[in-house]
């Protein structure tokens, strides 16, 4: 059989495009993924202890886009949640991102927005257009808070100095002078009620013209499948056989640890909550002598009722053979190399490169969904 579209990657990008093309335009789509599951990095599953976990790191859905919410709501109900994160350094937990509570913890007493703003005004570096991740933070909070929460965490996560990274990397972390201590600022913050994998399953079930084949690598099956147009959501440099050199990526290792009811009872003095290991869903560790960046107890966010809990430690790793390309590394050099690949891509008439890896952009889920919906509209013009 000849498919109208071959879609490489069964993550948000590939599945949204497959669903739209097959249901709106009646196209036949074959979606392949070399992993043995759907969902890409947003994949979640119940682990051996029955805890719903995000296999590839915590995925906090958030958006300001009504269009994205309306579209995804066809496939899921939502569990609304305020994502809460703490930073652990100097032997204690701090409210994070930096907000009035953090300032009060530093002072050891109650304070006000006015006092905090005056403190920041005295500490901020005057930089009109921050060019990198160091500048963006010191221009907001000054050197002391930068050193405490950002510098070493960023070095650990990226193995690059914040000065080498685009302002957008650290610039995504909000600063608030009130007591709002949510990690994110978007208006809509919620997880799919039954999880991401359930959402993707519904999307596939609703799309009879879309076929999904797992454990299938593009390089191996491209000659065996007939198709009219290719949508590629994998790494763009890999598609071109690294002919211009390798784009840098950052990888991670996830180490899960499950705790049962007995252990959790003893842990209540630390977590402050029955049935949990740590006080909030995520704790960041900026200290350089701690080898991991964060510990995530996703049960706080999913709202799952379960006697057990699973905490996942995240260790940053170099990207290389056998490892996943989790993060494009936003630097000036990588942007320049990407632009060269983009030139090559523009010469491929029947291929669309999209998604986080296909466009080499540090995009969140809602952004790749929005991008897929926009790409779909363009494809509709070309293949009415
Ligand atoms: P992916 O999900 O990466 O899917 C691409 C798929 O293509 C993969 O499954 C891969 O196996 C497959 N593939 C690649 N090459 C080939 C090939 N040659 N042959 C066959 N298959 C191939 N976003 C948020 O909004 N909130 C968060 O809290 C958040 N946290 C994150 C935490 C981590 C640790 C990471 C890594 C990402 C996080 N994200 C988060 C970003 C989110 O994962 C992405 O925005 C989203 O998954 C991108 O979807 P995608 O379909 O473009 O790519
Ligand atoms: N960051 C930091 N300290 C923190 C949290 C984040 O320095 O406690 C920096 C770090 O460089 C990180 C970036 O801000 O990569 C973005 O953080 P976020 O938590 O959004 O990262 P992601 O969830 O995308 O891994």
Image: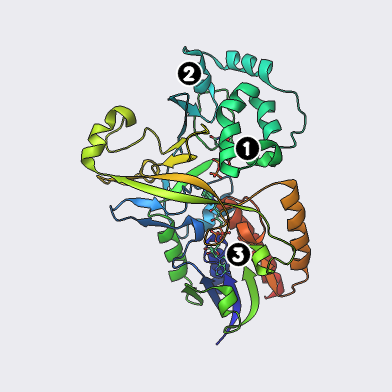
Label 1 lies in ligand 2 vicinity (Cβ under 8 Å): yes
Q: Which mark is residue 170?
A: 1
Q: Which mark is residue 105?
A: 2
**Residue toward you, 250 or 77:** 250
Q: Which mark is residue 193?
A: none
Q: Which label's residue is closer to the chain start, 2 or 3?
A: 2
**Residue toward you, 363 or 65:** 363
Residue extending furthest toward the left: 262
The residue lying at 60 percent from left, 14 percent from top is 114
Mark 3, residue position: 234
Residue extending furthest toward the bottom: 1
Label 3 lies in ligand 1 vicinity (Cβ under 8 Å): yes
Q: Are marks 1 and 3 in contact (CB under 8 Å)?
A: no
Distance in Å between CA atoms under marks 1 and 2: 22 Å
Q: Which label's residue is closer to the chain start, 1 or 2?
A: 2
Secondary structure category for the residue under label 3: loop
Distance in Å between CA atoms under marks 1 and 3: 25 Å
**Residue toward you, 139 or 287:** 287
Above or below residue 262? Residue 77 is: below
Residue 160: % across, % down: 64, 41
The residue lying at 61 percent from left, 51 percent from top is 363
Q: Residues within 10 Å of mark 3 (few under 14, many from 20)?
A: many
Distance in Å between CA atoms under marks 2 and 3: 44 Å
Residue 283: % across, % down: 44, 35
Please tell me in which quadrant of the rendered image residue 239 appears. bottom right
Please tell me in which quadrant of the rendered image residue 92 appears. top left
Q: Which label's residue is closer to the chain start, 1 or 3?
A: 1
């Amino acid at each position: 059989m000849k498919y109208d579209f071959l879609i490489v990657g069964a993550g948000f990008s590939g599945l949204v495009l497959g669903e739209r093309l097959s249901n709106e335009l009646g196209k036949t789509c074959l979606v392949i993924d070399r992993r043995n599951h759907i969902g890409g990095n947003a994949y979640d599953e119940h682990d051996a202890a029955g805890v719903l976990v995000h296999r590839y790191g915590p995925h906090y859905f958030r958006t300001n886009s009504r269009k994205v919410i309306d579209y995804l709501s066809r496939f899921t109900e939502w569990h609304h949640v305020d994502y809460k994160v703490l930073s652990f350094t100097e032997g204690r937990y701090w409210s994070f991102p930096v907000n009035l509570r953090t300032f009060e913890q530093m002072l050891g007493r109650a304070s006000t927005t006015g006092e905090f703003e005056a403190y920041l005004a005295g500490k901020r570096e005057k930089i009109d257009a921050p060019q990198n991740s160091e500048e963006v933070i010191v221009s907001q909070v000054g050197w002391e808070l930068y050193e405490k929460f950002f510098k070493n965490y960023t070095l650990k996560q990226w193995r690059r100095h914040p000065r080498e990274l685009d302002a957008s990397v650290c610039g995504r972390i909000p600063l608030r002078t009130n007591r709002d201590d949510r990690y994110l600022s978007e208006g809509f913050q919620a997880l799919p009620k039954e999880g991401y994998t359930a959402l993707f399953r519904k999307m596939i079930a609703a799309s009879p013209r879309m076929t999904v084949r797992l454990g299938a690598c593009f390089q191996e099956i491209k000659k065996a499948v007939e198709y009219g147009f290719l949508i590629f959501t994998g790494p763009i440099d890999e598609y071109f056989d690294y002919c211009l050199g390798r784009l840098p990526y950052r990888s991670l290792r996830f180490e899960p640890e499950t705790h049962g009811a007995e252990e959790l009872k003893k842990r209540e003095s630390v977590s402050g909550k029955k049935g949990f290991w740590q006080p909030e869903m995520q704790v960041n560790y900026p200290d350089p002598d701690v080898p991991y960046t964060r510990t995530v107890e996703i049960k706080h966010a999913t709202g799952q009722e379960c006697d057990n809990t699973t905490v996942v430690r995240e260790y940053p790793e170099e990207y290389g053979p056998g490892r996943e390309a989790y993060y494009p590394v936003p630097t000036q050099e990588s942007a320049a190399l990407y632009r060269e690949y983009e030139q090559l891509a523009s010469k491929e008439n029947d291929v669309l490169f999209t998604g986080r890896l296909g466009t080499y952009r540090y995009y969140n889920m809602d952004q790749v969904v929005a991008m897929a919906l926009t790409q779909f509209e363009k494809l509709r013009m070309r293949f009415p």
